[in-house]
Image (cartoon, helix red, strand yellow):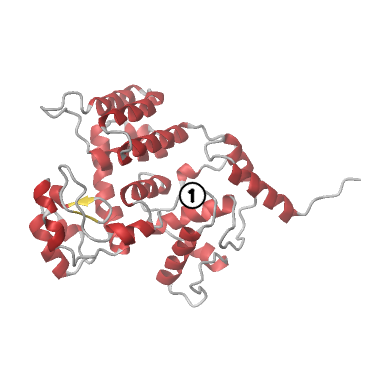
Amino acid sequence: MVTALPTALIFNHVQNICCDLPKQSPRWWVLATMAPMSDRLLQLNDRGPDVAEAQSLLNRDGAILDPDGVFGNDTVQAVRELQGVANLPNMPINGVIDTAVWQFLRGLPEPSADIPTRAVAFIGREEVGSRRLYDSHCARPAWPGGGSGVTIGVGYDLGYQTGLEEDWAGLLSPDQLSALRPWLGIRGSSAAAGLAQLAHVTVAWRGAWTAFIRRSLPEKIVATRQAFPGCDRLPKLCMGVLVSLVYNRGAALADPANLPGERQEMRDIRDAVAVGSLKDIPAALRSMKRLWPEGSGLRDRREREALLFEEGLQPVTGDRVNNSTM
């Protein structure tokens, strides 16, 4: 006689297997579909595909979490922030995902109609690190160096912007806008002098996220389409990777006069998109590492972009769940 195992025991076993596998593994997605995506109460230290689902939904609200299926402190903080913003009587601020939180999460709109939330959150993390790092290191104006200008929010570079008032309307105070305005168009070492004068300016994350999805991201999506014609035919997650690339490097395809070959891989990606040779794009992303020294965060970013692009190329079959659409 075969004794049936309790459903909860089977579910927990599947969760443990899922979280021990890399998300790129096809087995992760197959096993994830075995787990019932019900409104299970989730809290600190829980693991599993439903945690990854909740993290992906939290990213619609700007949590910029890595949907790794592990309910850690960053996820707790994201839930608490969501509960505070929702301000509903049936939703205490406790960092726990219950039925009320699940319902609220599923009602959140996607931050972009063009690329999946997974890609939007990826770009946000690449720009500011995490929510915690944003509050501690990025909430005040910064100068990234090189030819950059004073930068605020999620990579909003004043050195290359002209629409400050429109882009940040209702998000920054008149005094903050007045302090930032003189630094429009100022780039390079001249912009570094602005940091001391702008030390009193703090950009709250909610405003930074809103400006990102309302202004900066749509502009970069347009620029990506112009740089890589036909990229809308790519899987959405792959399209998001190219937006990340343009967000960081710009959309220019021509080499600077003093740096021959500096934009070669950008042209290679354009050509690969044109002929549908998508498997060549991760190699082009990795080839860009030559432009930065060992240990540079930009080398690491190119590798993460290449990995995410490769994930986006994986076929979706049957009932497999694919976070690239979330």
Res 68 visible:
yes
The percent coordinates of residue 282 (x first, y second) are 38, 29
Q: Residue at x 34, y 30 (%)?
A: 285
Q: Nearer the viewer, residue 38 or 3?
A: 3
The percent coordinates of residue 241 (x first, y second) are 36, 38
Is 38 situated above or below 313?
below
Q: Quadrant of the N terminus?
A: top right
Which residue ends up furthest to the bottom in the rendered image? Answer: 89
Is 147 situated above or below 152?
above
Q: Seen in the image, is 3 located left or right of residue 269?
A: right
Res 185 visible:
no
Q: Amino acid at mark 1?
A: Pro
Give the residue pinned by disc 1. 67
Which type of secondary structure does the marked residue at label 1 adopt? loop
> Quarter of the image holding residue 196?
bottom left
Q: Seen in the image, is 302 located left or right of residue 253?
A: right
The percent coordinates of residue 92 (x first, y second) are 50, 74
